[in-house]
């Protein structure tokens, strides 16, 4: 499915990726292979980030959210290793652990400004 937006909620244990457009939502959960709550092995962390980045492939704008710093670590990792995903990440914001429905609502509200700019040729 080709979707326009994505929101990712992530911590060190898992990522909830929700890709959506105006009519469809596709959800994917990715679990880290690390058994340590805050410090996985470097290889486990990289494999986790690779899997999340692969799921995000094709999204035009990505909002990354979650508790702690893992969302920023993922953003930095993408900047170094997955340039196309890094280019799609528009922001990283802190959040608790919302439901998938709350995540989509948050992202839709956040992305309204991008949708407005995309449809209004006077805004660049």
Image (spheres, helix red, strand yellow):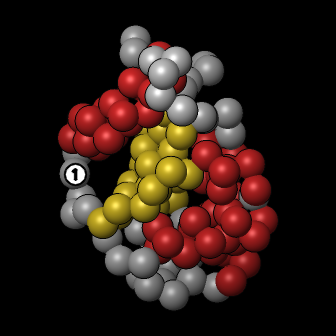
What residue is drawn where x is 47% and y is 16%?
A: 119
Label 1 neighbour load within 10 Å: few <14, some 14-19, many 20+: few
Seen in the image, is 41 located left or right of residue 16? Answer: right
Residue 83, visible in the rendered structure: yes
Identity of the residue drawn at 60% across and 34% down: 60
Image height check: is 86 above or below 41?
A: above
The local secondary structure at tag 1 comes to loop
Q: Quadrant of residue 75?
A: bottom right
Observer-nearest of 8 and 5 = 5
In this rendered view, identify the residue nearer to me: 65 or 46. 65
Can you name the residue that lies furthest to the front here? 122
Circle 1 residue? 98
Quarter of image, res 106: top left
Q: Is residue 54 left or right of residue 35?
A: right
- Residue in the picture at 44% in, 85% down: 38
Q: Would you say residue 17 is visible in this rendering?
A: no
- Left or right, 10 with reference to 59: left
Q: Which quarter shows the C terminus?
A: top right
Residue 90 image point, x, y percent: 50, 51
Query: Which residue is found at the position 46% from the left and 67% from the top?
Result: 71
Where does residue 58 sit, x and y in percent of width and height?
67, 33
In depth, the one of 42 and 81 nearer the eye is: 81
The picture places residue 99, in percent across and down from the top left corner, at 23, 45
Q: Quadrant of the N terminus?
A: top right
Q: Is residue 54 above or below residue 20?
A: below
Q: Is residue 96 left or right of residue 20?
A: left
Number of marks drawn? 1
The x and y percentages for residue 78 are: 68, 63
């Amino acid at each position: 499915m080709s979707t326009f937006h994505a929101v990712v909620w992530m911590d060190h244990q898992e990522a909830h990726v929700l890709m959506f457009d105006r009519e469809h939502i596709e959800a994917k959960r990715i679990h880290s292979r690390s058994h340590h709550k805050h410090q996985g092995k470097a290889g486990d962390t990289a494999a986790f980030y690779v899997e999340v980045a692969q799921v995000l492939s094709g999204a035009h704008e990505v909002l990354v959210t979650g508790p702690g710093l893992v969302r920023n670590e993922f953003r930095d990792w993408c900047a170094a290793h997955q340039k196309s995903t890094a280019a799609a990440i528009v922001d990283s914001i802190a959040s608790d652990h919302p439901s998938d429905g709350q995540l989509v609502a948050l992202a839709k509200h956040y992305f309204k400004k991008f949708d407005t700019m995309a449809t209004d040729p006077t805004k660049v």
